[in-house]
Image (cartoon, rainbow, N blue to C red):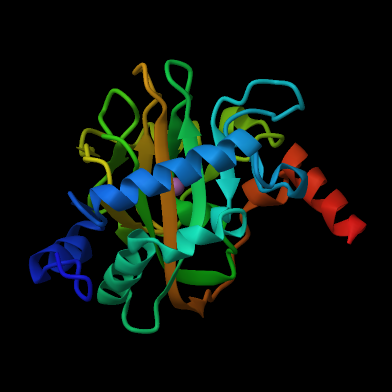
Amino acid sequence: MTAEKPLTDEQIAFFQQEGYLAIDALTTPEDVAELRVIYDRIFEQRAGRDEGNQFDLAGTDEEGRKAALPQILNPAKYAPELLESVLIRNATAAAKQLLGDEAVCRFAHAIYKPPRTGAETPWHQDAAYWSPEWIHKSISIWVPLQPATPENGCMEFVPGSQRQDVVPHQSINNDPRVHGLELTPEELAKLGENIVACPLPPGGATFHGGYMLHHAGANRSDIPRRALILSAGAPGEKRNPPRRFPWMEEKKTARMERAAAAADDT
Ligand code: NI
């Protein structure tokens, strides 16, 4: 791995064919140690709660209720030192290799999966959350800060599924008060056996595009599963003909209410 070109030609070709990629090191052990301290601090503070940027991805997120899957959006807003990390430098370089020099990379979110109780992240495509007006040219870079294993919720992909458009989704448990999305039962039934799990060491990474089907299991281990997710994008194309995503139009989450209240305050 070099700082300018973290990915080999073989890895780039694999990503283009299969739609995902797993690498053992996107950053250094020293950087991982620093990232973990920052990560634990912002979750301890529940940074961004009042603005709707800290919430339960998999539950209804009432105040005082233990979150099944705590998440912080835009963590660098609450910990700007993340922007000095080796990780953001290497992730940006890798994103340029995959998407071209116009790609920009940012810390998108952090998902904390508590020991024993951390819920699964159901099967979904990231583009199901995004504006249906666009064909997106974006990738997500998922980085664990401890080993990621099938037992604690490593990433799983369906190779080749990146070639399809967004398929029908619904809110988790079909409850529009929940932020997270999942495939509809009909789509879930089509998954089949072609699933690849990607265990990783700390500071390794998986890459996937917005249309790739992916999932992470529950955390059945005794330690928290910490993951930082970066997102990188290049300009997309306007979708023609247009589509609508009813699963996003019907959402009504406590996080959206907090975000709206915070916007009213300013
Ligand atoms: Ni996702």
**Furthest-bottom residue in view?**
101
Q: Determine the residue positioned at 24% across, 53% down.
A: 28
Task: Work out which residue is located at the far left of the displayed protein and give it.
Answer: 10
Give the position of the C terminus as an image quadrant. bottom right
Q: Taking 183 as reference, is 3 left or right?
A: left
Q: Where is residue 122 in the image (x, y as percent from the top left)?
A: 45, 34
Q: How many marks?
A: 0
Q: Horizontally, is 192 left or right of 8 in the view?
A: right
Please say if 176 is above or below 221: below
Residue 181 visible in image: no
Give the camera-side residue of 81 and 135: 81
Q: In which quarter of the image is residue 171?
A: top right
- Residue 97 placement (x, y as % from top left): 25, 75
Q: In this view, does 55 lie above or below 261?
A: above
Residue 192, quarter of the rendered image: top left
Asked whether the viewer can see residue 11, the reply is: yes
Rendered position, 100 above or below 163: below
Left or right, 36 with respect to 13, comes to: right
Taking depth in this image into account, of 80 and 52 the one nearest to the observer is 80
**Measured from the top left, where is residue 138 in percent x and y?**
42, 67
Task: Indicate the quadrant containing the N terminus: top left, top right, bottom left or bottom right.
Answer: bottom left
Residue at 69% from the left image edge and 37% from the top image edge: 176
* Residue at point 26%, 56% (across, down): 27
Which residue is nearer to you in this view: 220 or 249?
220
The quadrant holding residue 42 is top right
